[in-house]
């Protein structure tokens, strides 16, 4: 399968989107989920801050700051605020079919377009690739009628655990999880809600599902890609170091 043209053919994509995509009805093939929630958790015997953080795909530091804790001491019966992915999305992403050892890296992209969502990218990608939507996940910016800012869309390739089509080269696509944030980050910054959703999604994948065996990078970090993706306004250094 050849590398998709999306990264260097934005102009054409913009035209396709403007004339065609607006007419499509949602087919319901991707799960669209709001990432952020605040649940509460009752501390049980044997729990540690680390085990609770891990259970919910959070960093210990996040858990402490969310609960105003100055030390790591917790007590049985204490109620903690759990910011993060909802249990629905955790179940959806961490489904029983996930091939945990298959994935070696998580690669973040921008769409290079101001507007879009999983469905519109799918309709564009399927002209070149039989499996359509090249990414495993799309994080929306609320630019389409059916999506909201910070919403995570889980694509069919993740459900089926098949290779992506989001980078150049089969050897990388075969074992790289692709996350695309909608936006052109050569021109604008990602929204705060998109970054929040990205951090929570990455944390969940990297820590919970992959036990930190994956590397977390931007598209342009990958060898031989010749791209500016995910754009100069994406905080790539901070993102990489957060999950290093
Ligand atoms: Zn890219």
Image (cartoon, rainbow, N blue to C red):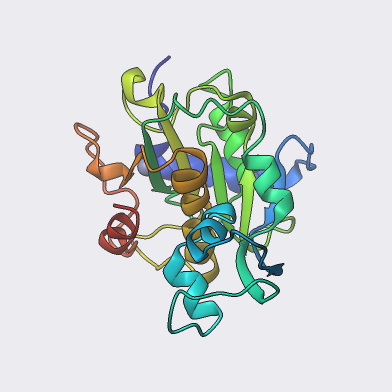
Q: How many marks?
A: 0
| Residue sitting at x 45%, y 27% | 165
Q: Position of residue 106 (x, y in %)?
A: 40, 41
In which quadrant of the rendered view does residue 46 lie?
bottom right
Q: Is residue 151 above or below residue 127?
A: below
Q: Quadrant of the N terminus?
A: top left
Q: Position of residue 166 (x, y in %)?
A: 42, 33
| Residue sitting at x 57%, y 17% | 130
Q: Position of residue 91 (x, y in %)?
A: 70, 43
Q: Nearer the viewer, residue 190 or 22?
A: 190
As drawn, is 141 to the left or to the right of 171? Answer: right
The quarter of the picture showing ligand 1: top left
As drawn, is 140 to the left or to the right of 113? Answer: right
Q: Is residue 88 above or below residue 8?
A: below
Q: Is residue 74 above or below residue 211?
A: below
As drawn, is 106 to the left or to the right of 152? Answer: left
Q: Nearer the viewer, residue 157 or 208?
A: 208
Whether residue 142 is visible, yes or no, is: no
* Residue furthest out toward the front: 45
Whether residue 207 is visible, yes or no, is: yes
Q: Position of residue 131 (x, y in %)?
A: 58, 21
Q: Is residue 75 above or below residue 27?
A: below
């Amino acid at each position: 399968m050849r590398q998709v043209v999306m990264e260097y053919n934005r102009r054409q994509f913009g035209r396709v989107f403007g004339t065609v995509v607006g007419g499509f009805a949602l087919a319901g093939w991707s799960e669209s989920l709001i990432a952020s929630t605040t649940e509460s958790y009752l501390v049980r015997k044997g729990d540690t801050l680390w085990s609770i953080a891990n259970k919910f795909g959070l960093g210990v530091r996040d858990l402490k700051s969310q609960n105003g804790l100055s030390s790591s001491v917790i007590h049985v019966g204490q109620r903690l605020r759990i910011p993060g992915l909802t249990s629905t999305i955790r179940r959806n992403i961490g489904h029983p079919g996930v091939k945990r050892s298959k994935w070696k890296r998580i690669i973040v992209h921008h769409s290079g377009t101001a507007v879009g969502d999983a469905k519109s990218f799918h309709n564009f990608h399927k002209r070149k690739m039989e499996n359509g939507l090249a990414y495993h996940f799309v994080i929306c910016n609320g630019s389409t009628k059916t999506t909201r800012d910070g919403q995570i869309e889980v694509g069919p390739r993740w459900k089926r655990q098949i290779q992506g089509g989001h980078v150049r080269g089969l050897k990388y696509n075969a074992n790289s999880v692709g996350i695309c944030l909608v936006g052109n980050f050569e021109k604008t910054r990602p929204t705060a809600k998109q970054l929040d959703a990205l951090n929570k999604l990455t944390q969940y994948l990297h820590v919970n599902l992959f036990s930190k065996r994956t590397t977390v990078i931007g598209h342009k970090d990958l060898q031989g890609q010749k791209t500016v993706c995910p754009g100069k306004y994406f905080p790539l250094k901070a993102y990489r170091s957060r999950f290093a």
